[in-house]
Amino acid sequence: MSTTEPDALLGPAEIRELAAALGVRPTKQRGQNFVIDANTVRRIVRTAEVRPDDVVVEVGPGLGSLTLALLEAADRVVAVEIDDVLAGALPATVAARLPERAGSFDLVHSDAMLVKELPGPAPTALVANLPYNVAVPVLLTMLERFPTIERTLVMVQAEVADRLAARPGNKVYGVPSVKANWYADVKRAGSIGRTVFWPAPNVDSGLVSLVRRAEPVRTTASRSEVFAVVDAAFAQRRKTLRAALAGWAGSAPAAEAALTAAGISPQARGESLTVEEFAAIAENKPEPSA
């Protein structure tokens, strides 16, 4: 890896100049908040433990502040950007600021929710400042579609970070917590203040680390079957599982039978169950009566 000049990264002045030249104003519609602090992007790359042999996929690179820091540390970076202007400008920014690394950068101009393949070698890591309004679906979609992603570090709204990393019994434990845990061991990896963004959001941000499970959840049920139980359990989270899963099972007695067969109290609530327990319920779904 070649060494890079310390000024390769973007600071507040460069971000604003670049945005002005492109006529870019961050939009709430796309949840855009650009990181303007070079120390923060270095911290993200360090926390993500990006290695020289990593192929990193980045979603929502924006003006490229994190992209440049990733290119300094990884073998390759593939950035997925939906915005026409930002997607058009990013390759030129990389070429201007890190010319010796431009050949190790690919841009995919698309909505991340629609991306089913990426150019070049399979990605090994996902590192991104995810747009607040689509953070959870984008994260789960990328983990599903790209099973070679071993390590993930995402920056999301602090409240979303808490939900993703919550454990059973926690009041914010819910659908994102269980589904993320299906793929990975999840933990909070730090907090980020508001002043490192432009525009400064009215909420704090958090880093979430996800390390893909060495072994998948052991179950004969499919991912979609398990997720159907999770969705049903939390759609009415105040209800007991016997009541909440009645629609999924066909009736409350059928739900009770499935729960009992899985070794779970029909009076329990979804917020107390592990992903393995949801999988056990899915395995015991009753056959629909003729």
Image (cartoon, helix red, strand yellow):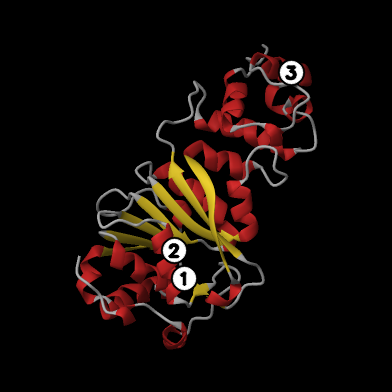
The residue sitting at 39% across, 61% down in the picture is 46
Q: Nearer the viewer, mark 3 or mark 1?
A: 1
Q: Amino acid at mark 1?
A: Thr
Q: Secondary structure at mark 1?
A: helix
Residue on which the image places disc 3: 256
Residue at the farthest top position:
290
Using the image as rendered, state which of residue 204 and residue 246 is in the foreground: 204
Q: Secondary structure at mark 2?
A: helix
Q: Quadrant of the N terminus?
A: bottom left
Q: Earlier in the sequence, mark 3 or mark 2?
A: 2
Question: Residue 60: where, in percent of width, then height?
Answer: 45, 64
Q: Quadrant of the C terminus?
A: top right
* Circles 1 and 2: CB atoms closer than 8 Å: yes
Q: Amino acid at mark 3?
A: Glu
Residue on which the image places disc 2: 44
For residue 44, which quarter of the picture?
A: bottom left
Q: Is residue 247 above or below residue 286?
A: below
Gap between marks 3 and 2 measured at Cα: 46 Å
Q: Left of 127 or right of it: where is 274?
A: right
Q: Residues within 10 Å of mark 1 (few under 14, many from 20)?
A: some
Question: Residue 286: where, in percent of width, then height?
Answer: 64, 16
Q: Earlier in the sequence, mark 3 or mark 1?
A: 1
Q: Residues within 10 Å of mark 2 (few under 14, many from 20)?
A: many
The answer, for residue 215, to whether it is visible in the render is: yes
Question: Residue 193: where, in percent of width, then height?
Answer: 59, 70
Q: Residues within 10 Å of mark 3 (few under 14, many from 20)?
A: many
